[in-house]
Image (cartoon, rainbow, N blue to C red):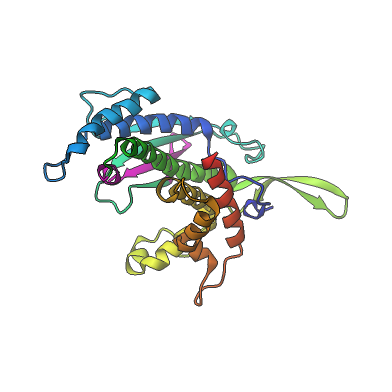
Amino acid sequence: MRLNQLKVNESLVKYPERIYKAFSAHLEQEILNYMYHYKISRDDLEPEHKNIKGMVAKVANRKGVTIEQDWKKGRNNKIEIDVTPKDFPSRYTPRTQKEDAYANLQIVYKPSANEDAEGTHQTGVRDNKWLHRVKIIVGDIMEDLLEQIDPKEQFRQIHYILQRLNSTLRHELMHLTQEFALGKTTSKKFNQKTGEWETDDFAYTGQTDLKPGYGDEELAKDHPEFGRRSHNTSPMEFDPMIESEASRFRYTFYDRTRPLNPQIKHYIETSEFFNFLKGDRLHEPDPRYPIAIKKFTKRVQEYLT
């Protein structure tokens, strides 16, 4: 049984909730302090920007986050937590899978990055245990906030920044789930000879499959569209990309004053991810395209509920 072929009523790959809550709390603590202490250049400073520090403090207070007056970027940008099979749905993890692991989060500030938030997930070994490294690269998150004039919009934008960063975190933790529990998983298959269902503790899922060129930085540099296509359409990226697309729709595209369905349709038509799946005269349509649309629509509705 391949999990990427399950019925659409199956949710996206589950990220480990306990780890997400710990990492998200730390991420929000750091980002709110970063925004509070952010120094606006004299050339960019406008009268309406004087409200921003107070707005950030207000959001922090609502979330129970402490604004540290002596906060410094990079001083407390890492956190580590244990990972156990109990962090994942029982149907994900093979019954024989008893290994624990570590996961650490590192926050990297890179205002020159192309996106306001990017992420990576890498695996290694430490003390004979798997180590999952999650890195959140924080780009110029202040750009959209500084464009806002109305205090209500400033407040909303601070919230949106946190949500987009958390979505990047969920994307990378989905990869942790795939690597830890979904490379192989408990499944059942029907034995035609005995007429019984047999358990296969290490059924292959396809969740960690990669297309040729995935992760090849030199190739992506010389052929950027091929690099993005290889990355975005690899089976390992399917559910995490849908999570990211749904978050991007909700927090950068969605207009709450307009009907939802036309907005979803327009977003899908303009999204590079969905256009890669749809195919063109040089590329065959991906059979997962209609599944991606249904999963995306379902996730958007969850965001709006």
Please check the rendered image and state whether residue 132 is part of the magenta-colored stretch, yes or no: yes
Residue sticking out furthest to the front: 257
Q: Quadrant of the C terminus?
A: top right
Compared with 10, 33 (above or below) is above
Q: Residue at x 16, y 45 (%)?
A: 44
> To which quarter of the image does residue 35 belong?
top left
Q: Is residue 211 visible?
A: no
Q: Is residue 236 visible?
A: yes
**Residue 260 percent across, percent down from the top left:** 53, 50
Residue sticking out furthest to the right: 194
**Residue 229 percent across, percent down from the top left:** 45, 64
Q: Nearer the viewer, residue 164 or 138?
A: 164
Compared with 7, 29 (above or below) is above
Q: Residue at x 20, y 33 (%)?
A: 50
Q: Nearer the viewer, residue 94 or 125?
A: 94
> To which quarter of the image does residue 219 belong?
bottom left
**Residue 68 percent across, percent down from the top left:** 25, 23
Q: Is residue 68 left or right of residue 208?
A: left
- State which region is magenta: 122-147
Q: Residue at x 64, y 51 (%)?
A: 3
Q: Is residue 113 left or right of residue 210?
A: left
**Residue 141 percent across, percent down from the top left:** 30, 43
Please check the rendered image and state whether residue 243 is part of the magenta-colored stretch, yes or no: no
